[in-house]
Amino acid sequence: MITNKQKKILQSFNRFRSPIDEVSLYKGIDINYLKLFKKEFKGMFKYRPRGGRWSPYNCRMRDAKTFAIYKRESQNRRRYWVV
């Protein structure tokens, strides 16, 4: 499911791993790496911005300094509504 390239990327960010008692998988990653994660791990994780101007826990992606990575409930989930 995870390629060798993806494993290597995750190992290089090992120092950003969240403690076991937290919901996030990684936190405190510089916002400049967001494009890398979105490209290499398409549909595998949810990304939440952190460290903005107004509140460090609730900010917009454009104001963020760092981001956290969370597990996605179901990969590539698409909702189709039937009427």
Image: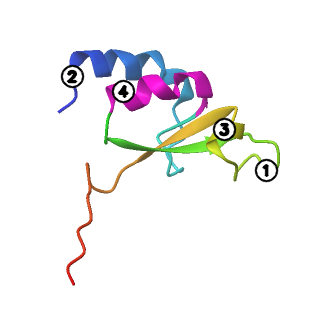
Helix, strand or loop at label 1? It is loop
Examine the structure image and report whether residue 29 is included in the region drawn in magenta: yes
Quick one: which residue is furthest to the left in this view?
1
Earlier residue among tags 1 and 2 = 2
Q: Residue furthest front?
A: 83
Question: In the picture shown, does residue 76 fall above or below 6?
Answer: below
Q: In the image, 59: left or right of 2?
A: right
Looking at marks 1 and 3 on the same chain, the residue that comes earlier in the sequence is marked by: 1
Q: Which residues are magenta?
A: 28-41
Q: Amino acid at mark 2?
A: Thr
Q: Estimate the spatial distance between the alpha carbons at disc 2 and disc 3, rounded to whole Å.
A: 30 Å
29 up-or-down from 9: above or below: below
Q: Amino acid at mark 1?
A: Ser
Question: Considering only order in the chain, which callout, 4 or 1, is on the residue closer to the N terminus?
Answer: 4
Residue 32 among those drawn in magenta? yes
Residue 39 image label: 4
Contact, CB < 8 Å: mark 1 with mark 2?
A: no
Query: In the picture, which quadrant includes the N terminus?
Result: top left
- Residue under circle 1? 55
Please, what is the three-letter code of the amino acid marked with disc 3? Answer: Arg
Question: N-terminal of the two: label 3 or label 4?
Answer: 4
SS at circle 3: helix
Residue that numbered label 3 is attached to: 62
Residue marked by disc 2:
3
Can you name the residue that lies furthest to the bottom here? 83
Look at label 4 and name its amino acid: Lys
Q: Nearer the viewer, mark 1 or mark 4?
A: 4
